Image: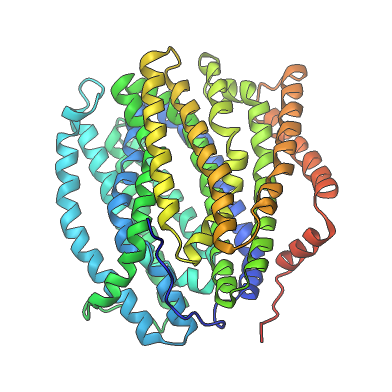
Amino acid sequence: MEELTDQTSIPTTGVTAEEGKRHFARNVLSSIAFFAFNAGTSLYFVPYQIRNLGMVNYGMVTLAQSFPGYLQVVTVVIIGAVGRFVTFEVARKNHDGARAYVNTQMIALVWLLAVLTPVCALFSYFAPSILRIPQGQAGNVQALIFLVLASSLLTLPIGVLRVSTFIRQRFDFNRYLDGLDQAFRYSTWVSLFTLMAPALWHIGTGYMVGTVVSLVGSWILFRKLTPELKIRLHGFDGRKFREMTRMSGWQTIGQIGVMLYLSLDVLIINRMIGPEAVGKYGTVMGLSLMLRGLAAMIGLMMGPMAIAYHARRDYVSMCRASARAVKFQSLVMAIPLGIMCGLSVPFIAWWLGPKLVLLHVLVWLMLAHLVWNLGITPLFGIATAMNKIAIPGIATIIGGLAHVGLAITLVKYTNLGIYGVAISSGISLTVKNLIFTPIYSGRIMGTSSWPLFKALAPSVIWFAVAAAAGLGAAKFLLLDSFLKLLGTGAALFVVCAVLSYFLTIGRQDRQFASQLVFRNRRRES
């Protein structure tokens, strides 16, 4: 299938590689801080929900959390490309054109919300007859699913409003709002669980409250960061809408593939095994999603820099910067992933209890392959920047379909159960990300793919080192408390991080990192 080509003349001012470097350290640190906050609160609130609701009901929470992934298939065609087009117009100082894109998307969103809201209500109403649910929980399941889906619909205007942080490359503001979202969500759960008998609809209410707070904050940021972009719900521009959906239509194809990779796992388990199995799978899946979120936040920062290199048609520098980004990101992910896998037995025993310690196998199956599958994330921005997203979208759909087929086969014809679903996910993601993505990225840049593959090699070695150290610590130390686990994990991380820095990071890599950390403020002429 023929690729879409970028016919837009992109300016070389406005959004630059130096601008990306200027805020890179702040953005990375805020992402790491949010990840730490999210990890800490999740470690508490996953067993908190299980204690108050039971594992079977927690399985319904996990399942409900997957449904927004289906909505994204529909909605990405409306908002998927808005950031790219608005950024180009702002770079041209064409504020009228930027406002036209934003207003067109907002008007389209109003129409979309008018259609999707009753659809979500109908799905929620009939969910008990479609899914395997706990006995006597039909009303609670209906309320939970509708509130989760409704809060997901509210994130759509948030996606458009946050174009301001993309333009200014202030992704740290997004992390602050995400933290507020989490804080209000958890506070709502605790309040309702304390005042009433814990129920599934309390979880949905927490999602709604947090999303409303995030929406208000995003609106304030939009007004402060981009006052030149004033939203008016009139003046729909059909030409601009078609221009954006032409690109985001291919993003929709890719999003279908993402849904097949990530959102169908728990539905397959629900229908073929049962809601309690979904709850068990969901505990470890939550760890995987947190790490995916961290990788996506860091990888997103490569997007504006890729646009800048594409603007200058400097693909040699783009490849070099992409390889370094892959090297740094994969190393950042490899050491904590290795430690988590190595310490998985005492960690699961402390976190979820000795009865669920066998889930440590799931930790290895779901987390180990993320070393390369998340390390490659910075490359995703290359295809988007160059508007070469048709083939990646098709590849993602093919891989997603292969994953679903293999997962169903392993569950149905083997005794692997939820472990079979995890195995299928790891295999299919590796084929798509580790093999296809670097090759395709090199092809569209007109450069060799070897530097991109080479950049991943150190992370695999350091994952093995960290995992071996974790296994040794778990065997010889009594790690039966949070403080012991935290202290051991922190010590292993510091040792591995220091050694990897001096043994793996070269002089040019350190210069590149130094520029990012110290926020080089030089502007391109």
Residue 392 in percent (x, y) is at 45, 52
- Picture layout, residue 28 above or below residue 186: below
Q: How many marks?
A: 0
Residue 1 in percent (x, y) is at 37, 55
Residue drawn 57% across and 67% down?
306
Left or right: 139 as drawn, with respect to 360: left
Residue 485 in percent (x, y) is at 68, 29
Q: Nearer the viewer, residue 491 or 339?
A: 339
Residue drawn 37% across and 40% down?
189
Residue 54 in percent (x, y) is at 37, 23
Left or right: 97 as drawn, with respect to 371: left
Asked which quadrant contains residue 194, the reply is: top left
Kindly tell me whether residue 5 is visible in this rendering. yes
Kindly tell me whether residue 262 is visible in this rendering. no
- Picture layout, residue 472 above or below residue 122: above
Left or right: 408 as drawn, with respect to 496: left
Residue drawn 28% across and 71% down?
241
Q: Nearer the viewer, residue 369 or 434?
A: 434
Asked which quadrant contains residue 13, the reply is: bottom right
Identify the coloring: rainbow
Residue drawn 47% across and 62% down?
384
Q: Nearer the viewer, residue 282 or 251?
A: 251
Assign the C terminus to one quadrant of the image: bottom right
Asked which quadrant contains residue 18, the reply is: bottom right
- Picture layout, residue 429 above or below residue 442: above
Left or right: 277 as drawn, with respect to 307: left
